[in-house]
Image (spheres, rainbow, N blue to C red):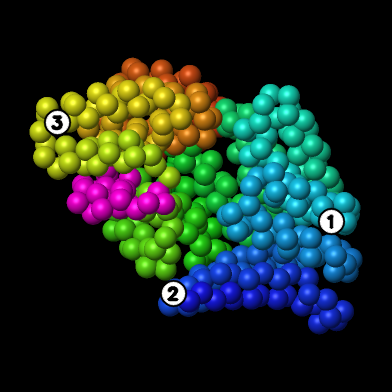
Amino acid sequence: MRFASPFNLKNVETGAVVWTNAYDRLAADTLAPRQVAVAASQVVRCGLWGASSYRRKMPDQGLSLYLQFCGDYWGGAAEDEQILEAARRVTAAVPDFSFGWSALALAAVPLSQSASSGEAAELRTEAWAAAERAGNLDALNPEGYMAMAGLLPLNKFAEREALLKKAIGVRPTECGCERQFYGDFLTSVGRMEEAVEQYERARAMIPLAPFSNVRLAHALHVVGRHDEAERIITEMMQMWPDAATLRLLKVKSAYWTGRYADALPLLDAPDLHLTSEQRRLLAATFQALASNDPARKAAVVTELESMAKNPRRNDRLIVAALAALGADGAALDASRRLINDRGHALAAVLFEPNLSDAWRSPQYEQLVTRVGLTDYWKSTSNIPDICRLEEKPGFCTLA
């Protein structure tokens, strides 16, 4: 038996229902009430937090459209194009609403990064203008700065950081998203200890959502606080047992904790976003690591290297697997391809624990220099955590 849990948000002054949604769940699912409450609260919080900044009385139609955008943006099921169109409807209905324009800017960021060159340029122009308008209407709106940071070329590290710092500084009652965005940036430039602090701040504002917990747990693992990370993952998997992002992190963290037996069964979950070949190779990696058999390790490395050459199959899990197997050169090659194919934000993979043996290699120095990280570290004096080690890499003298 299934049930639909309806939510209605009503303006008691006008009697209008400004948002409604029904969450379809199995009647026997004991976690459903809590999960539905979290999902609905994210939408309502998004809508009311943004609308609270509006200097005039928000019309019911405008608030309803903005809540629809929030539902699409936070729901996880809507396509990027649908989210963008929802934001455009808000700006058309309430053209002096700052958070409507910043919603449009934020919604355009992922599309501008994935569209063809001509369409991407048009989207960036539209999004940048929307972000500027959001700031002109409300200087305390952090979302416009967040969108601008996402619209800049990803290797513009210093410029992006300046915008993200504005985002976390303009409004003391932030929603937590700004902290999460800044945490993502810090991971991409190797400042993991600082990223943990930002993710903790974000999680404090959004405590029960899988995405805020996944980011914090991942960062905790990277800085070596494995017990704290595992506790967060365990708690969240009890509440969100079907969350693929949690299971993927559990799989990946086994490379850092050595808990290979715990990770193997998770690879059988049908809704993991992995191909059958990826599942097979990751399972073979764990089995080879557990056996500590050099021949088995070498055989898996050969297959992983082949997969890493395919842009559609190469990802952070493949890099982590190669590094865990001790194939540092192959892991750095896969990292270089990943960054080239999917953007400099994925430079975060260069600071994960299994690559620690490669941090002092010439190949690693060439890669961080090519990505633009050494120039960023030098120009800002914001050095990565690995340059605080007792045996720091040679390139740290450049930063």
Left or right of 215? Residue 22 is right
Left or right of 102? Residue 161 is left
Q: Cα distance, mark 3 to mark 2? A: 42 Å
Observer-nearest of 316 and 362: 316
Residue beneath disc 1? 97
Observer-nearest of 155 and 39: 39
Identify the element where label 1 is drawn. Answer: loop
Residue 149 in the image: x percent, y percent? 65, 39
Q: Is residue 397 visible?
A: no
What is the three-letter code of the residue carrying label 3? Arg
Whichever of callouts 1 and 2 sits on the residue coming sooner in the sequence is 2
The numbered dot on residue 297 is none
Residue beneath disc 3? 296
Q: Is residue 106 above or below residue 394?
A: below
What is the three-letter code of the residue carrying label 1? Phe
Count the labels in the image.
Answer: 3
Q: Residue at x 80, y 65 (%)?
A: 63
Left or right of 179? Residue 71 is right
Residue 365 in the image: x percent, y percent? 39, 21
Q: Residue at x 79, y 37 (%)?
A: 126
Q: Is residue 301 above or below residue 218?
A: above
Q: Cα distance, mark 1 to mark 3? A: 60 Å
Identify the element where label 2 is drawn. Answer: loop
Left or right of 237? Residue 380 is right
Residue 377 in the image: x percent, y percent? 50, 29
Q: Is residue 280 above or below residue 5?
A: above
Residue bounds of the magenta highlight: 250-272
Q: Residues within 10 Å of mark 3 (few under 14, many from 20)?
A: some
Residue beneath disc 2? 29
Identify the element where label 3 is drawn. Answer: helix
- Asked if residue 264 is among those painted magenta in the image, a careful observer would answer yes
Q: Cα distance, mark 1 to mark 2? A: 40 Å
